Image (cartoon, rainbow, N blue to C red):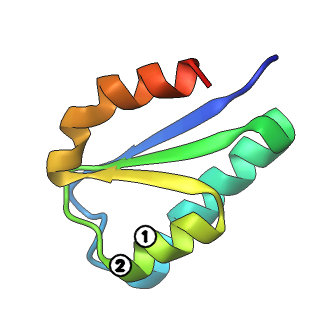
Amino acid sequence: MNRLLMIECKTSRFGRDGLKDASYIYKIAQLAKNTGGLLARGLLLSARPVGDEIRNRAKEHQVEILAAEEIRTLPDYLRKWMNG
């Protein structure tokens, strides 16, 4: 079964403007859906902490977030994702 993981990285500006942050989430969700279909998922990496409002919006659009210290778990996340 083929699946797609669309990853986008945001650094210095992410987390400062809720409307702009929401647009990033919508963008990655649409790219994943349009490119990989129903089996595609989005993953947003942020060097800065991300608040609950953005996390909830991401969850609604099937985009996962690893932010700040969570980025250290990226190798484990990728292994789990590859194993289904």
| Residue at 84%, 43% in the rendered image | 38
Quadrant in which the N terminus appears: top right
Across and down, in percent, residue 46 comes to 29, 52
In front here: 31 or 84?
Answer: 84
Under mark 1, the amino acid is Arg
| Residue at 78%, 37% in the rendered image | 39
User: What is the crowding at mark 1: few (fewer than 14 residues within 10 Å), some, or many (at least 20)?
Assistant: some
User: What is the crowding at mark 2: few (fewer than 14 residues within 10 Å), some, or many (at least 20)?
Assistant: few
Q: Is residue 35 visible?
A: no
* Helix, strand or loop status at disc 1: helix
Q: CA distance from mark 2 to mark 1?
A: 5 Å
| Residue at 43%, 19% in the rendered image | 79
The residue identified by callout 1 is: 55
Across and down, in percent, residue 47 comes to 21, 50
Q: State the mark number for residue 52.
A: 2
* Helix, strand or loop status at disc 2: helix
Marks 2 and 1: CB-CB under 8 Å?
yes
Q: Is residue 46 above or below residue 7?
A: below
Across and down, in percent, residue 53 comes to 41, 82
Q: Is residue 79 above or below residue 28?
A: above
Left or right placement of residue 76 versus residue 56 in this view = left
In front here: 10 or 62?
Answer: 62
Name which quarter of the figure residue 30 lies in: bottom right
Quadrant in which the C terminus appears: top right
